[in-house]
Amino acid sequence: MSHIPAMPSATQEHDVIFENIGMTFQTATGATQAVANVTGAIPEHKFVSVIGPSGCGKSTLLDMVGGLLQPTQGSVSIDGEAVTGPRRDTAMVFQEDSTLHWRSVLDNVAFGLEVKGVSKAERHERARKMIELVGLRQFEDHRPGQLSGGMKQRVAIARALAMEPRVLLMDEPFGALDQQTRQFIGRELLRIWEKTRNRVLFITHDIQEAVYLSDEVWVMSARPSVVKEVVKIDLPRPRPEGTHALPRFRELEDHLWALVKVEAEKTLGPGAQLA
Ligand SMILES: Nc1ncnc2c1ncn2[C@@H]1O[C@H](COP(=O)(O)OP(=O)(O)OP(=O)(O)O)[C@@H](O)[C@H]1O
């Protein structure tokens, strides 16, 4: 099995670097240590997925990169700059529909650029390129209410990519979609990503999805979480249809499942599911 037992050393300046980061939430009923200690890096042009049992701190980790949460220990930096709050050079896509219902698809995709002060002509040009990339050209004048759930998520992905982010943060972006749409949009995401090669941090509960999309999968332990193992996904790219049937794909999937099962059982007992 091609994996390394610990996170790589966090020394590269042009990476997203996690240095001993941890997060403890203070609540009325006491302290909850969500993330114990994570050190590692997302190198340029890499697609990294994070899996782990429910409640282990995956979203917390992503929110610390996005600057939505400040770690209570350690630091996160992007290309050598410490993350101290939300940044315009990171973009996030969540599970929930985040489209603005009163705006057209074009104006939804251009929204982030508008906030950044980009001129109308330029933001529409950049937005149209992204709409083309996600396959929604005929729908640019539609409102989100006229689109399916999968199409709305493609609008959210186009809006994020239009910002040309240094890192794209995706928290269960297909979690609300039916299985068929989820597989279809997963393939679409991979096709788009092969063209843009942004760094991606992708949270998912779906091990197959993680193997199919990623260069590396980080397996988080039960809370308080650490990265238990980084599994390199050594499947060749591009990954055509049929990749799921490769013996190596099955091997990686089985290995990841075995790792996560041990962690899920720590919190949920024997026979636990991933989420
Ligand atoms: N704002 C908060 N205040 C207090 N506790 C929190 C807060 N956010 C998260 N937590 C706690 O931190 C832990 C990790 O939560 P987080 O949402 O990061 O896990 P997760 O792995 O993304 O979960 P899931 O897989 O179910 O989406 C949980 O125990 C959660 O209850």
Image (cartoon, grey):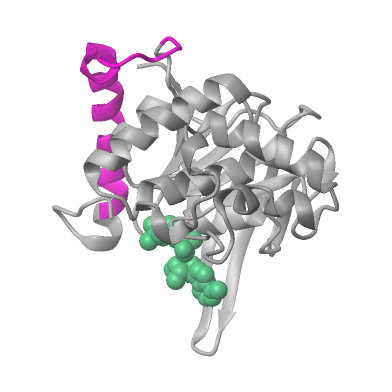
Q: Is residue 218 left or right of residue 163?
A: left
Residue farthest toward the top in the current orientation of the protein: 236
Residue range of the region highlighted in magenta in the rendering: 236-264
Q: Is residue 260 magenta?
A: yes
Q: Specify the principal SS of the magenta part.
A: helix
> Is the residue 20 above or below the residue 17 in the image?
below
* Image spot of residue 38 (x, y percent): 59, 46
Q: Position of residue 109 (x, y in %)?
A: 62, 48
Residue 226: % across, % down: 51, 48
Whether 247 is among the magenta residues is yes
Q: Position of residue 207 (x, y in %)?
A: 31, 37
Residue shown at 49% from the left, 88% from the top: 29
Q: Residue furthest left?
A: 271
Residue 17 makes an appearance in the image: no
For image coordinates 36% across by 26% down, the residue present is: 212
Q: Is residue 121 visible?
A: yes
Indicate left or right for 138 with 262 as reference.
right
Q: Residue at x 57, y 55 (%)?
A: 104
